[in-house]
């Protein structure tokens, strides 16, 4: 019993009149209009802003009070502080000259859908909590499967990011290799599991093997061939060596469009090796998968239809607002067996065969992410999206040709779709140049290490960029060297 309260007593909190009433839904209408006006001005002004935030670490925090307010504050004060503090302290991911990392695109149609999703504010964990969210998700997975030219046997679900999808695939690899005993008993006393991937695979694979309890030392990075794709013969030999050593091979992660230089593993050959050893396969096409809506690029992942799991991120190149990753599954049953739970309080009474997508992934809670896919595919159409991707690829190739002809510059890795890397003179000069580029602010580029060299990445993929925006990279390079 809490100190100071007798049995049967309840705590009564006196009502204190507020100087400012908390925000209401009527006020939300007014401020939503104001926010929409601000958003319009913001996007119109992006080309005039430096792409990367030009602030020092800690500068934003010092502008905020040390403690939360006790009383409500007027929204006019809050919005004024937002305008003063936030925009200039953000790197502008929707800037048309954002050529760093991979874009996290948000088309206007996607933004509108997110506003509606925010207003509904559903927790789409079960079919019965959000029937439309579940069923639109099922249909959108089918639309995207067909748009990418994947075989009709694939189904799938929407995750927050490819990292989560890859973790789900690795967890499934783990439990399948253990004969599903690990679901109940864990890994204690079991064989040493092994996961195989190329050196070009994204770090999310490393994170997945750590979180799955398999361990970093058991992620076997397979040597690559001259084109930096995984060597299938080396993969086969590594699996055979592990079997001879008494280890337990569990699965293969195949890369289609690596983050560093855009490398593509030979998908068909790698999956053939995996299937010969009865290993579960996952294809990471987080960035490049979007390009497969263009039939002419599909040779890059030839053989993908034999994969058990495939992930791609519509938020990287299709204009669907972050976060949105699609995992296609040849058969969802193994993943559900690994991840699915249906306690009594999550039952849908009288519906035993219903689809509850929380059983396909790690979180129980789920956002209504499929709505923005539906809006984008309808608002721009596949042909409109194909045109954007084709332009980005063409402009990246044109830019690479121009940079390659400039004195002191070398193209280190040629265009993989719309991504290439270059260096200037030597490592020190390249690193110094990159710092000048990003301090200048007209464009934003990032770096990677390739074969021991410091190189600069250029990745064209921002939804609203133009040829002029892309060629601005060459102008900045000329101006700063």
Image: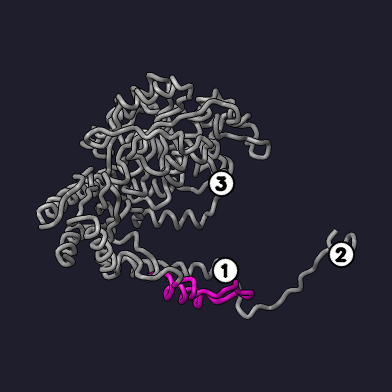
Crowd rating for badge 2 (residues with CA inside 10 Å; few <14, some 14–19, many 20+): few
Check the picture and name the quadrant holding the C terminus.
Answer: bottom left
Residue 24, labelled with which disc?
A: 1
Which residue position is annotated with label 3? 365
**Horizontal relation, residue 4 to residue 478: left or right:** right
Crowd rating for badge 1 (residues with CA inside 10 Å; few <14, some 14–19, many 20+): few
Residue 167 among magenta residues: no
**Horizontal relation, residue 74 to residue 380: left or right:** right
Which residue position is annotated with label 2? 5
How far is disc 1 from disc 3 in space, using C-alphas? 26 Å
Q: Nearer the viewer, residue 327 or 319?
A: 327
Mark 1 vs 3: CB contact within 8 A: no
Q: Nearer the viewer, residue 417 or 407?
A: 407
Q: x, y (%) of residue 31? A: 47, 70
- Start-end of magenta stretch: 59-87
Q: x, y (%) of residue 436? A: 25, 66
Q: x, y (%) of residue 36? A: 40, 66
């Amino acid at each position: 019993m809490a100190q100071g309260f007798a049995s049967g007593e309840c705590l009564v909190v006196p009502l204190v009149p507020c100087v400012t009433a908390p925000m209401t839904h009527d006020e939300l209408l007014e401020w939503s209009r104001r926010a929409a006006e601000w958003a319009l001005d913001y996007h119109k002004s992006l080309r005039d802003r430096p792409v990367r935030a030009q602030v020092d670490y800690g500068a934003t925090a010092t502008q905020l009070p040390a403690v939360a307010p006790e009383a409500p504050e007027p929204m006019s004060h809050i919005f004024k502080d937002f305008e003063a503090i936030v925009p200039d302290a953000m790197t502008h991911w929707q800037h048309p000259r954002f050529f760093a990392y991979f874009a996290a695109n948000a088309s206007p149609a996607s933004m509108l859908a997110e506003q509606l999703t925010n207003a509904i504010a559903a927790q789409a964990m079960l079919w019965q909590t959000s029937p439309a969210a579940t069923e639109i998700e099922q249909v959108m997975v089918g639309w995207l499967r067909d748009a990418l030219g994947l075989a009709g046997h694939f189904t799938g679900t929407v995750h927050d990011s490819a990292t989560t999808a890859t973790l789900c695939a690795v967890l499934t690899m783990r439990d399948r290799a253990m004969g599903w005993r690990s679901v109940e008993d864990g890994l204690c006393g079991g064989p040493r599991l092994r996961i195989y991937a190329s050196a070009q695979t994204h770090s999310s694979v490393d994170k997945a093997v750590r979180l799955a309890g398999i361990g970093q030392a058991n992620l076997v990075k397979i040597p690559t061939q001259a084109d930096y794709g995984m060597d299938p013969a080396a993969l086969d030999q590594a699996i055979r060596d592990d079997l001879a050593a008494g280890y337990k091979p569990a699965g293969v992660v195949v890369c289609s469009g690596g983050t560093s230089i855009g490398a593509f593993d030979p998908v068909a050959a790698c999956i053939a090796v995996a299937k010969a050893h009865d290993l579960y396969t996952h294809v990471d096409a987080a960035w490049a998968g979007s390009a497969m809506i263009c039939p002419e690029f599909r040779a890059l992942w030839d053989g993908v239809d034999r994969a058990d799991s495939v992930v791609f991120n519509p938020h990287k190149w299709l204009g669907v607002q972050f976060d949105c990753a699609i995992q296609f599954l040849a058969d969802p049953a193994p993943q559900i067996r690994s991840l699915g739970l249906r306690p009594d309080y999550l039952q849908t009474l009288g519906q035993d065969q219903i689809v509850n997508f929380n059983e396909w992934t790690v979180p129980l809670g789920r956002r209504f992410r499929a709505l923005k896919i539906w809006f984008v595919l309808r608002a721009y159409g596949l042909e409109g999206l194909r045109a954007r991707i084709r332009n980005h690829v063409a402009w990246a190739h044109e830019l690479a040709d121009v940079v390659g002809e400039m004195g002191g510059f070398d193209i280190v890795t040629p265009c993989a779709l719309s991504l290439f890397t270059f260096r200037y003179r030597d490592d020190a000069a390249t690193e110094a140049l990159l710092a000048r580029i990003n301090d200048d602010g007209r464009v934003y580029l990032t770096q990677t290490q390739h074969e021991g060299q410091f190189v600069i990445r250029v990745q064209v993929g921002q939804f609203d960029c133009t040829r002029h925006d892309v060629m601005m990279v060459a102008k900045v390079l000329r101006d700063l060297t």
